[in-house]
Amino acid sequence: MIMTFIGVPLSVIGSLMHWSNIILFIIYCLTIIALASFMGRATESLAIVAGPRIGGLLNATFGNAVELIISIFSLKAGLIGIVLASLTGSVLGNLLLVAGLSFFIGGIKFKRQTFNVYDARHNSGLLMFAVIIAFVIPEVFSINMSDTKTLSLSVGISVILIVLYLAALFFKLVTHRGVYQPGPETEAHQDEEVPEWSKGKAIAVLFIATLAVAYISEHLVHTFEYVGETLGWSELFIGVIIVAIVGNAAEHASAVVMAFKNKMDIAVEIAIGSTLQVAMFVLPVLVLVSLFFETTMPLLFSWQELIAMVSSVLLMVVITNDGESNWFEGLTLIAAYIIMGIGFFLL
Amino acid sequence: MIMTFIGVPLSVIGSLMHWSNIILFIIYCLTIIALASFMGRATESLAIVAGPRIGGLLNATFGNAVELIISIFSLKAGLIGIVLASLTGSVLGNLLLVAGLSFFIGGIKFKRQTFNVYDARHNSGLLMFAVIIAFVIPEVFSINMSDTKTLSLSVGISVILIVLYLAALFFKLVTHRGVYQPGPETEAHQDEEVPEWSKGKAIAVLFIATLAVAYISEHLVHTFEYVGETLGWSELFIGVIIVAIVGNAAEHASAVVMAFKNKMDIAVEIAIGSTLQVAMFVLPVLVLVSLFFETTMPLLFSWQELIAMVSSVLLMVVITNDGESNWFEGLTLIAAYIIMGIGFFLL
Amino acid sequence: MIMTFIGVPLSVIGSLMHWSNIILFIIYCLTIIALASFMGRATESLAIVAGPRIGGLLNATFGNAVELIISIFSLKAGLIGIVLASLTGSVLGNLLLVAGLSFFIGGIKFKRQTFNVYDARHNSGLLMFAVIIAFVIPEVFSINMSDTKTLSLSVGISVILIVLYLAALFFKLVTHRGVYQPGPETEAHQDEEVPEWSKGKAIAVLFIATLAVAYISEHLVHTFEYVGETLGWSELFIGVIIVAIVGNAAEHASAVVMAFKNKMDIAVEIAIGSTLQVAMFVLPVLVLVSLFFETTMPLLFSWQELIAMVSSVLLMVVITNDGESNWFEGLTLIAAYIIMGIGFFLL
């Protein structure tokens, strides 16, 4: 709370007065993380009112709006490599770190935590589709393709990803709303809770905090180059790991809070829903938007980025398949994230 | 009905009188698809008499007999690339398009459709074995192998595939017949239905239609080169997509009809059973048969074909793992098929 | 029994008198396999006293102690390729051959055999982590990395593997001991059985047999080069297939015995537990130990070894996912092993 009221003005003043980039970097990061906890509380209040699914959806949206905005600015500047790296980092971060921390911290308090197994399997199918099909195919086919054809394939796949993403929303919210819902037992449990803030206040906080995060994030990006040089971090490492951790702090915070309250449905929805939104919406939209810019962006990751995502999806599908989690599954996901972090750091 | 009685004589006359290849191509395709719907109805009649499993088996057999015959003629002509492409297309078409259309169209009518989860998992194991082990291993090992050794490996794997395929039939029809069957509820539901045609008539129709399809298919193959040149389609695209769609029209038609009648056990058996028959029987038999021809065929797909099949199998295993389907899962499979279609078109 | 009392002294005499290497090779192999059946019986006696989980753990430990010792000697001699090959062989052998034979032979006697599905899924997560993440990442990242950085990555991953392995033991034996246990029904079944040997005798037999196996194994290794030259076997084939079969004879014997007695929990624990111990403990320890030797060993398999392990893990995860086995699943695993055996033989 206090950090936010100090951090936001400090960020504005610091950026106007051109303080040292390292100091600004630290201020920006801490302020975003503080704002993220605010957003987490606001989302939680809304989630109690709106039910677990819409709550999770809201959360993922507010987390990824920031990423979409930053990425569009990067794209305009022709920084395709950084955009793909930060989206990779977002996928890895949400899938391994957010879910991992939720399972681990929730699992320390509760021996066995369960979540909606139908949603988990629905999400597994989408993760497989997005990463194993839509990301892998252009990578393998582009080997024997001209750049023009690779771009055509990327555009085609992007359109299909967006259509399927919208169809998934239609499926969840219209044709199959409540079909795979848990019984009345869970509902009763949720009715007991009282939201911290009113609906209006929660929305206002979410709105203002999102704006503040967006403002600070934009300045944060400009400190990266200097920080990288000073600390010896590669652009890839900054994109995949640092941007992803700070950029997904909102999801991290609220997913872990939900896991700690044993609301695993929401925690999983945040982690995987956010991954899917990046993979099936943010990324294909950026590919299409890039057509209007000087430098077009095909749907081509580096092999390291691609294999890291494929491995993570396969691990996640196997781990969430039974609709249960415990601290050890969380630790496994975190360990996978650390391995990839070391890999991208050394690359 | 009418199309068949017009299409078959038209095909014969047209091929004898050397009409324009584009016109012949269209006549052939439509006639085969019309014949396929006949075969679908005949198979359905037989399936009611014979039960879901034998019915599915029959269907897959009549669908793939055509493929085996065409492939042997292609192999004799040394067109190894087209044989492998059309088998890849058959695997992708059955796995993604036939199953996808069944799930989608069946799912529009019914909210949740279930199929025998034991059969689905048994089939998943076989899909993994055939594609992830038997197709991947020669591809990766051949990198450091001489051509002679690659052929030896291909022959060894082909023999093992055929043995395991026969063992799977023995398992299904002898040692574990009915062990994983659903309860009497489903049986009762099936007993109500009356087959459209008698057993004898259905078998006669199947036999004659199969002959007609084989005759027309053979002529169809010879129009491909011309059509490809005229329309700008690559041989790979014709092999993987066009041959597969027309060649599997029978499975498409009858699987979708079954799904629409909520007989998902048969629909899934047609789609996956047909895939397995191509991967574990048609393909290895062709490898062995090629030993007697001038040009031998090792079990080596292009990387694009291989990865497309591996991705499809992984997606299918995850989607069918719960023994349930809905329209969205169908759409996901169809979307995956379209992505691969675009990929092979541009390659 | 008799074979052991003849084989052990024969091995000692033969090695001292420098008999023909081929004859020594056969004597060593048969003696180790005979000793393994002893160890199997001793482990079974202990398992009845200690319960299925500790029993399986004991078994895996005694099987892999031998491998660890042999590998350290090989490492000291700079034979990195053989160490990685024999560990690959150990993973493939345990995963495909030990589990395959257990499922097959157990499945011939019993129509459907079940095992603890929670343990199976827990193990699947670990297999995915070890092979798909920890082994795949250094392979793909090292493409664009210097040797020094590859070694750093290998060391980091090795430490993480060991930490997670210890955490898995802590999870199984402390925080979640008995949480996923089957009901009292199974316990009752086990109480009926009487151990063949007393606890003290079983431990003594295990201890002496392990020492004898270690002694003979060390001599066995020195016959490999000669046998390879004489029979035309490559070092890779000897490492992956021969060392693995002889080195894992203990697991083979006792897992199959357990499967034949319908104690699938123990059989699966031996096969997969042993795989995990090799992948998550023996291998990373060897990477760290190699830092003190002249030739350091990075965590880099050949592509053939890596893909063989990845395919096997994916097949195993799909097959054990339902907590059931039958003879056909066993045959599928054995067939996969034979395919890989042919591949490594021809390589």
Image: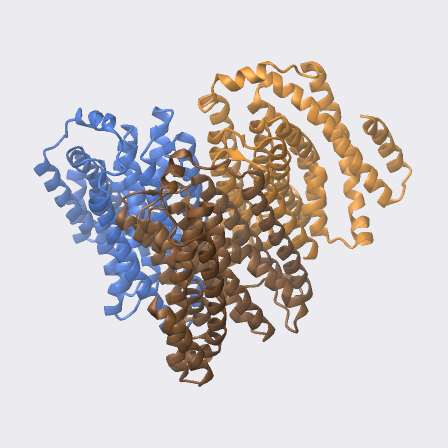
Chain colours: A orange, B blue, C brown
Whether residue B307 is visible here, answered yes or no, is no
Residue A25 relative to residue A94: left or right: right
Q: Position of residue A262 (x, y in %)?
A: 60, 27
Q: Position of residue C22 (x, y in %)?
A: 38, 80
Q: Position of residue B205 (x, y in %)?
A: 13, 40
Residue C250 relative to residue A18: left or right: left
Residue at image coords 59%, 38%: A327
Q: Position of residue B131 (x, y in %)?
A: 38, 53
Residue at image coords 59%, 62%: C299
Residue at image coords 28%, 37%: B180
Residue B247 relative to residue B311: left or right: left
Quadrant occupied by the C terminus of chain C = bottom left
Q: Is residue B267 above or below residue B14?
A: above
* A113 and B154: which is toward the camera: A113
Residue furthest to the left: B200
Quadrant occupied by the N terminus of chain C = bottom left
Q: Is residue C5 above or below residue B185?
A: below
Whether residue C164 is visible here, answered yes or no, is yes
* A165 and C73: which is toward the camera: C73
